Amino acid sequence: MTTTTTREPAAGRVLPRQPWNRHLIAIGILGAVLVPLPLLLPPAQSAVAVRVLIFALMSIGWNIMSGFGGMFSFGHAAYFGIGAYVSAWLLVERGVSPWLGMAAGMLVAAGFATLIGFLALRYRLRGAYFALATFAFAEMLRLWAINSDLVNRAVGYHVPLRPESSWWYLQFEPGSANYFWIALALTVAAMAASVLFLRSRAGQFSKAARDDEDAAAAIGIPVMRYKLYTMALSAAVTSVAGAFYVQYFLFVDPDLAFGSSVSIQAILPAVIGGVATVWGPVIGAAVLGPLNDITATILRNPPPALEFLQGRGGLDVVVYGALLILIVLLLPQGIYGALRGRWSRR
Amino acid sequence: MTQTPDRAHAVAGNGGGVVSGDLDDELEPGGEPAPRAPLLRRVPWLRVAIVVGLVVAGIALAYLRSGSGVVVMQAVATGVLIGGVYGLVAMGLTLIFGVLDIVNFAHGSFLALALFLTFWLVNGHGVHPYLALAVSVPAMFLLGMLVQRGVLSGAMGKPLENQLLITLGLSLIIENALLLFFGANPRSVALPGDRGVPILGAVADLSRVLAFVGALLLAGLLFLLLQRTRLGTAIRAVAANDVGAQLAGIDTRLIYAVTFAIGTACAGAAGTLVAPLVTIEPTTGALFNIIAFVVVVLGGMGNVVGALLGGLIVGLAEQLGGLYLPGQSPLLSVFIVFVLVLFLRPQGLFRRAA
Amino acid sequence: MRKTWTTGLALALPLALAACGGSAPAGTDRADGGQSGGTIKIGSLHPLSGAAAADGQQMDNGAKLAVEAINNAGGIKSQGGAKLELLSADTQGKPEVGQSEAQRLIQAGAVGLVGTYQSAVTANVSTVAERNKVPLVIDVSSADSILAQGYKFTFRVQPSSTVLGTQGAQFLDEVAKAAGRPAKQVAIFHEQGPFGSAIRDAFKAEAEKRGMKIGPVISYDSASVSDLTTQMTTVKASGADVLMVSGYYRDGVLVAQAADTVKPGLDAVFGVANGAFDLPQFPKEVGAAGEGYFDANYHPDMTKPETQALAKLYQERYGDEIRTGAVLAYDAVRVIADALERAGSAEPEKVRDAIATVELDTLIAGDGPIKFGPTGENENATPILMQVRDGKVKQVFPADKAETAPVYPAGR
């Protein structure tokens, strides 16, 4: 339990001065390099690429609160779902542009996170208790949405199709590269936001509070306030993923928005890539996003030696589960964490 | 009550939670058991009285809301019986939580595995459902040992999220392996001579009553194991302070493996006992998992008897909640109770705030 | 040193996989791009793993048998006897997986899709189909909202929730009146999702119109409910004489167990589009407790020899009794094949136009051949009434589809 609250600084993990500008430049380069990607990939692979970016966005948000802030959230579905539902509701019921819906979703999600955060911190929940509290709130939102006429109960929302493409309404031809570029821009912005956050007072203070709360409080840092900032930012980033998800998949219902598997999806990329690192969530999403499709593809057209496995439902998920365990066991610090460990030892 | 509950967490964090079949934490920091006080005096009577009072008030409210005594009686009977089942499932989980400090997401899948094992024994080999315990419990014990040594030992002491993902991976593997081998058709196990039995104006299936009795027996057995045996003492010592326990000559690696195995064996026992009440599918275990986590927190992590009582509270909240909020999901009331308890008594209802 | 090695290995693993994966889907294109070389591809999207895997696998099998039957009969004759090829995909019951799998199948050259069972997945796949201009024939997914979007490329073989609920109330009324014990008060259990709620609304409207009193109405979460005894006691205390149940398999079993324990004194337990009461394994699982249960549901017409032959073939091939979903998937593939035949082209848009004018005999009990209305709804789709008799599910109403006469009241 304390492992999350007092994370041991591993070798090379805490550098005296983080090279922030280098991070920002690298993020910019990554974004620029990926721009031509949808023109090179076939449509089904482009869909996977967009999915990877949505995962990355969710997980960047999670990482701000749970990685940098040290408050393990097991309920990020709440923020993802709020982003999805607020924008869907505004669009379907009021005809408001999804861009405005996205902004509104960020506000609502940040507000909700502040509320949960205030309660959880007020009652001093930590570690697994904090995680279960966040989970409970996400679950309550799901159960409420299922039975609430305000959000169309369990039916959820279909985004109406428009006759032609529209940037204002964020709808394009199927397989349009615009989807990828928008998701890419949002992801780059979220990464930049997390770097800027780390550089800011709020980021420094909340990392200090993560590493030693009592000491941070003792030197006069208003721990509670900075923790709440962190949570609000984290929730806002994840809610953007939800809002974009609705526009891309054109449908949302309570399980897709608030289900516990959504919370897990927000955690997975960061852990695989490297918790509390700027690059971890993106790397993790890039590995995990296609993994499911890859195992499914291999088992669909297996090499001759494995032909007996063909067409058995569930096998791809078994392989996926096994790979998940292997990655976590072999790279407990995540891919980026392990790489950085190697580099700094050199 | 007002003492800072995070202290309890800090202690728990040091060595992996405080396990005690006891209603109190009676361990000294050094891992040596405190002198044993008479059992009755160690029960936190006041807290039990408050909880019982709240439950009675809840029942009275449900009566006012529904206006039918029979319905409320039935809700209480069903809630208690089903709560026993929840407690049964949560016992193994709370043990693992308390000693190994692992949020075991695969617990429900182990339960599903035991369900299928029971199904295979009963329908394939004509074994009586309850005799299947003789196979499912040792088999799941062994499996738990193997899993802990083979997979989880590498993740001991790692952050919460790493363990979470490993157990998540395990549950994906188990559920889908079951799907591969048994196919996806729902299965069932019939208890010979199962019928409705009257309880104070309400009725319940015999199999549910027996599962409830099984839960009581299992809680008692675990309590005795933890309190009255050398192994139990060692487990509690490791839970309180693993470094100290190691210095005192306890093989902590062995204790971790054995504790996880006992926890899994509990899932095995639970699986066999609930087999006659549920539809057996690879995903059946997952249904119980979420509720089991709630129960573990209500009862206090690592507290076996607390898990049983927590289960009863969740069962009652679910059934009575259905009467309070007819249009809403019964689970909503369970989570409301859960969050209230988390805020007011995060160390669980039945443990002293360190 | 050792650390370096494991890190390297662990890194190499996903990367190597990513490399394989990058080439593998592209490899599916090698098979002659869809229609030119004598095979025409049809995509089948169903949950082959996850909680609904049992039904998903049945439906995928049904689609396979249809392709096989059509190929054995000489393929698509108007296109030089072109053979059909079924591309099966696993949606895992997740909309985003369904979406990317649908994309993949369309990219691999599928000229039509069948699927998908879960309404959330179907909603997603239908937008993919619409935007790529490839027809989707829904075999199972009853949510009204899917076809309320004005999509042109989506068709549905099974009846909608509204038809199911309305017809259910009508059947109950007629059967009860014919037996001389009209239903006075009907209690309702329904799962709280869109499916159960839509059936409840349609049933309630029609039943009240026919003079029945409705209440109590109790909803539950089918994913987590583990006991319905209390709810059954509420029904007993209310004095209702019929209990209508709309839900899935597991909760249907719980209803039967609760009724057996509580003995609510009902004239009938009456399922509407119930996912349990008309399945062959239901009476096996609950035994005598399920005897006499009704279900108004879409169902294979077992009075037809073709249906009986299909059921027999299914049993031989897969060692399992065929379910309605598999027959619907079988019919959905036949709809696409018939359209291919009449269109004389494997151009998806032409196939879509041909589907819109389809008129095809069906193995499902209905009011006539499969024929789509302007919204894509099968106009002749209707439920029939079944009843569990001596541990077997029998068709009992209306009379022309009946294998035997209904028994009412079927006391509980």
Image: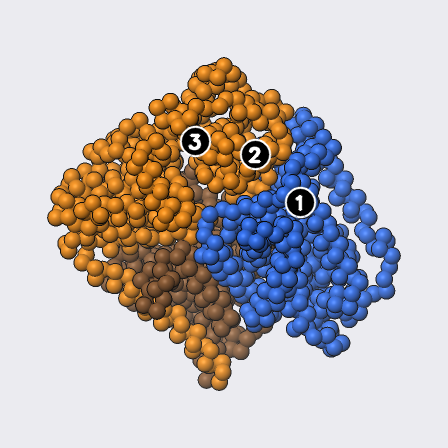
Q: Seen in the image, is A273 located left or right of residue C157?
A: right
Q: Which residue is mark 3?
A: C394
Q: Quadrant of residue C362?
A: top left
Q: Secondary structure at mark 1?
A: helix
Q: Secondary structure at mark 3?
A: strand
The subunit letter for the residue under badge 1 reads B
Secondary structure of residue under mark 2? helix
Chain A colour is brown
Q: Amino acid at mark 1?
A: Gly
Asked where in the image residue C313 lies, by quadrant, the reply is top left
Residue position marked by numbered label 1 in the rendering: B83
**Chain coloured blue:** B
Q: Is residue C379 left or right of residue C276?
A: left
Colour in which the image shows chain C: orange
Label 2 belongs to which residue? C289
Residue at point 45%, 71% (across, down): A335
Co-location on one chain, circles 1 and 2? no
Evaluate whether residue B67 shows in this view: yes
Distance (Cα) linking label 3 and label 2: 16 Å
Residue at 38% x, 29% y is C383
Amino acid type at mark 2: Ala
